[in-house]
Amino acid sequence: MSVQPEDRTTIDMFSTPRRGRPRSNPYDRRVQSRFNKRFQRQRDKEQGLQRLEVKVEAAVITRLDEVCADLGITRTEAVNLALRHWLHM
């Protein structure tokens, strides 16, 4: 019988008891990150959002960060506003 790291029902069945403070999460950091990314993608999809990855010059990012700090918005919000303006939406 094999055990998957994501197995939530038999996580304690095959593990050895450990001394000390109990872990708040039975999964290692890599598995937790994978869960969190999956759940984030699901939340984004439910909100009608899609990922967009672009490569931009460092000077543009620096200026974008300055503008975002002045306006009190995130990079995502700033890029979204700029694209909407450019596309006349």
Image: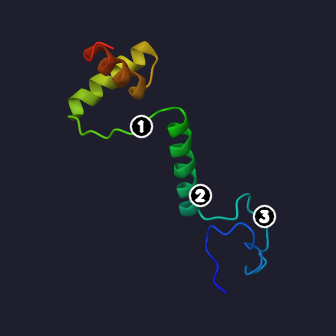
Tag 2 residue: 32
Image location (x, y in percent) of residue 27: 64, 64
User: Disc 3 or disc 2, which is closer to the eye?
Assistant: 2
- What separation in Å lies between label 3 and label 2 (alpha carbons)? 17 Å
Verify CB contact (< 8 Å) between mark 3 and mark 2: no
Numbered tag placed on residue 50 in the rendering: 1
Where is residue 6 shown, x and y percent of the image? 62, 67
Q: Looking at the picture, which amino acid does disc 2 mark?
A: Gln
Mark 1–mark 3 Cα distance, whole angstroms, equals 38 Å
Please tell me whether mark 2 sits on a helix, a strand or a loop.
Answer: helix
Identified by mark 1, the residue type is Gln
Q: Earlier in the sequence, mark 1 or mark 3?
A: 3
Say which quarter of the image contains residue 85: top left
Residue indicated by mark 3: 22
Image quarter in which the C terminus is found? top left
Q: Quadrant of the N terminus?
A: bottom right
Disc 3, SS: loop
Image mark for residue 81 = none
* Depicted 1 relative to depicted 87: above or below: below
Rendered image quadrant of residue 86: top left
Q: On the rendered structure, is 30 left or right of 16?
A: left
